[in-house]
Image: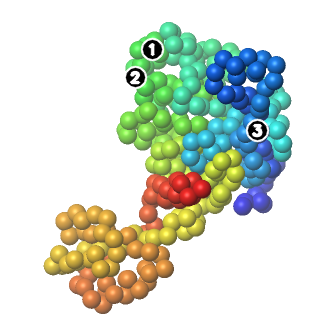
């Protein structure tokens, strides 16, 4: 885990600091039927659910971190604690040296939270009216507001959308306006929970490109959850992976593949259309280009055989994309549950 992070000019060593952060829920349970319902009026059975358990990591100012895990892993619960929407059951969290759950005004002016399934824009009025409301709420000076709005309009191509009622916008158009509204006060920390959910491929690409540009321009710290691995691969050099509320991994995407994925991908071009199934699992064949999946422990041996036995014209060895890594982790989990 990353435990020591260099300081910044503002004197903050970690934009986000989590130490043994935990959240427990006590959920009422009852059996089916009228008798059980009547019994629950005087006696209740509860089940304790550990949504997040002892999560510990730091995020440096300006860092973009992918926060990964299956559904129900505790990602959204963690982000809600960091943004001050939930109070932790145990542990410590600091965001820009603030206690998030105190919800101090200065803290709220320095962060933003974007959830792909939630709306912040008023549905029946144009987005520009909501933007003006945000300007008043955050106390943004008029000159700063105009400057930032012009920048958002240019980067996200919002000009045709500003004066349409939000209910008339497509999902991709609405998400662009949601993003602009969330960034008008120029936050230093962005909590993004599935921000590209439901967007088409082009809208996802534009969204990612804009977030990368915002990070470069303002040095914003970003914690991103997404099931679209393109978001993570393009924006994040580091990922934190959790499952059932517990941390499984904290490190680079390359290190994630090294730890959890037991094979390498070989792409090669050879003359003669040789049968390569004896060297590994053939994943695809496009023209003369063939892709093999080879166990990591056998990679060097397979490479030596290929070079010695075949007329190789081109050869490339790489780790599979993060999509394959995450899929493999999920498969391992499902297999473990089936055995249990």
Residue found 28% across the figure and 75% down from its top:
277
Q: Residues within 10 Å of mark 2 (few under 14, many from 20)?
A: few
Q: Is residue 296 left or right of residue 269?
A: right
For the residue pair 18 and 22, the one nearer the viewer reads as: 22
> In the structure shown, which secondary structural element does the residue marked by tag 3 occupy?
strand
- Write the residue at 72% across / 61% down: 1
Whether the residues at callouts 2 and 1 have beta carbons within 8 Å, the answer is: no
Cα distance, mark 3 to mark 1?
A: 40 Å
Is residue 64 among the parts visible in the rendering? no
Q: Would residue 204 appear left or right of 143 to someone viewing this image? A: left
Viewer-closest of 209 and 151: 209
Q: Position of residue 261 (x, y in %)?
A: 51, 66
The crowd level at tag 3 (other Cα within 10 Å; few <14, some 14-19, many 20+) is: few
From mark 3 to mark 2, how far is it between C-alphas?
41 Å
Q: Which residue is mark 2?
A: 170
Q: Residue furthest left?
A: 272
- Residue 167 marker: 1
The residue under the point 76% across, 20% down is 39
Residue that extends furthest to the top in the rendered view of this protein:
124
Residue 43, position in %: x, y? 81, 24
Q: Quick one: label 3 or label 1, which is nearer the N terminus?
A: 3
Q: Judge left or right: residue 34 versus residue 131.
A: right
Q: Where does residue 26 sit, x and y in percent of width and height?
A: 77, 33
The label number, if any, that marks residue 205 in the structure image: none
Q: Nearer the viewer, residue 266 or 206?
A: 266
Label 2 to label 1, Cα distance in Å? 8 Å
* Residue hosting label 3: 48
Can you say which quadrant of the picture contains the C terminus?
A: bottom right
């Amino acid at each position: 885990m990353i435990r020591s992070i260099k300081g910044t000019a503002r004197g903050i060593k970690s934009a986000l600091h989590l130490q043994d952060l935990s959240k427990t829920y006590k959920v009422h349970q009852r059996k089916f039927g009228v008798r059980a319902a009547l019994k629950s009026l005087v006696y209740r059975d509860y089940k304790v659910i550990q949504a997040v358990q002892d999560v510990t990591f730091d995020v440096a100012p300006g860092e973009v971190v992918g926060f990964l895990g299956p559904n129900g892993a505790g990602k959204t619960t963690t982000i809600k604690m960091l943004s001050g929407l939930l109070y932790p059951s145990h542990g410590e969290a600091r965001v820009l040296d603030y206690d998030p759950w105190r919800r101090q005004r200065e803290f709220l002016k320095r962060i933003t939270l974007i959830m792909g399934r939630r709306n912040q824009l008023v549905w029946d009025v144009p987005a520009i009216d909501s933007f003006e409301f945000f300007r008043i709420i955050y106390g943004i000076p008029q000159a700063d507001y105009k400057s930032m709005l012009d920048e958002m309009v240019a980067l996200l191509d919002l000009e045709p959308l500003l004066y349409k009622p939000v209910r008339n916008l497509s999902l991709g158009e609405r998400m662009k306006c949601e993003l602009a509204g969330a960034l008008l006060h120029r936050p230093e920390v962005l909590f993004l929970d599935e921000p590209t959910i439901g967007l088409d491929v082009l809208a996802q690409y534009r969204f990612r490109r804009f977030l990368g540009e915002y990070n470069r321009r303002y040095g914003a710290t970003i914690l991103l959850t997404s099931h679209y691995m393109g978001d993570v691969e393009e924006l994040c050099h580091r990922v934190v992976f959790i499952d059932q509320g517990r941390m499984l991994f904290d490190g680079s995407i390359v290190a994630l593949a090294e730890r959890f994925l037991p094979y390498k991908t070989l792409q090669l071009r050879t003359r003669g259309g040789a049968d390569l199934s004896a060297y590994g699992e053939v994943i695809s064949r496009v023209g003369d280009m063939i892709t093999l999946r080879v166990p990591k422990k056998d990679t060097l041996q397979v490479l030596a055989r290929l070079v010695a036995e075949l007329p190789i014209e081109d050869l490339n060895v790489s780790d599979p994309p993060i999509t394959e890594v995450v899929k493999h982790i999920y498969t391992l989990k499902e297999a473990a549950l089936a055995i249990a």
